[in-house]
Image: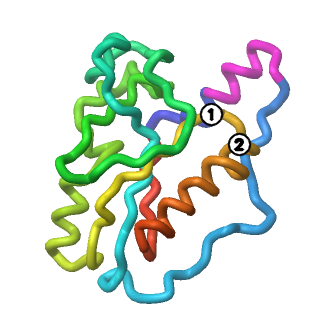
Amino acid sequence: MIRYMERTRNYYGTLGYPAYEWAHHDQVPFHAPSKPLSESRLALITTASPHQRELGDQGPGAAYNAAAKFFKVYTSPAEPTPDLRISHLGYDRKHTTAADPNTWLPIARLREAERDGVFAELAPEVIAVPTNRSQRVTCEVDAVAALEHCERLGVDVALLVPS
């Protein structure tokens, strides 16, 4: 088992930073779905970025690539499956290669679940939310934009797949 939170806390503590205050919400903005999942349209929300060849290596096992980072919520057609990557994110590159795109963009698995009747329909667009490292910007800007896209797409539930 890899204790990511403990390792992160220890790493920053060693550098002299005060203990991190994990994001929390006194009032949770979620609510129970109004209908069964099997009758619901589902939105996929990811933190993956569009592949841009001119920005360097973004493939499996690529080093951290800040140039590939994005800063505004965007959408992309779900069909054909978009080429979204995660080289712009800080993940444990020692223990994973990011070779399986289903870990950040599980469209193929969701299509199987849709065929099996787990939910009624996958929304026609994927919603991508940046990782700006600001709880305020995430709550006041990015979450609002993602919700607007969900409403525009007529979804009932959203699956958040952070990387």
Residue that numbered label 2 is attached to = 137
| Image position, residue 133 (x, y; %) | 66, 34
Residue 17, percent from left and from top: 81, 21
Residue farthest to the front?
A: 152
Residue 79: x %, y % from top left? 20, 52
The foreground one among 10 and 143 is: 143
> Looking at the picture, which amino acid does disc 1 mark?
Asn
Say which residue label 1 marks.
132
User: Crowding near pointer 1: few (<14 within 10 Å), some, many (20+)?
Assistant: some
Region rendered in magenta? 8-17
The kind of secondary structure element at disc 2 is helix
Q: Say which of 96 and 59 sits in front.
A: 59
Looking at the rendered structure, the number of numbered marks drawn on it comes to 2
Residue 49, percent from left and from top: 40, 33
Numbered label attached to residue 98: none
Q: Does the magenta stretch include residue 112?
A: no
Which of the two residues, 11 or 112, is positioned nearer the viewer here? Answer: 112
Is residue 143 left or right of 118 when viewed as pictured?
Answer: right
The residue shown at (63%, 28%) is 8
Q: Is residue 40 left or right of residue 147?
A: left
Q: Main secondary structure of the magenta part?
A: helix
Bin the neighbour count of mark 2 within 10 Å (Cα to Cα): few under 14, some 14-19, many 20 and up. some
Q: In this view, does 147 lie to the left or right of 159?
A: right
Mark 2–mark 1 distance (CA, rounded to whole Å) = 7 Å
**Residue at 16%, 75% in the rendered image:** 116
Q: Mark 1: which secondary structure?
A: loop
The residue that appears at 41% across and 48% down in the rendered structure is: 75
Q: Tell me whether the residue at label 2 lies in contact with that at label 1, contact meaning CB atoms closer than 8 angstroms.
A: yes
Above or below, 2 against 95 in this view is: below
Q: State the residue lying farthest toward the bottom.
A: 35
Q: Which residue is drawn at 81% across and 31% down?
A: 19
Q: Does the magenta stretch include residue 12?
A: yes
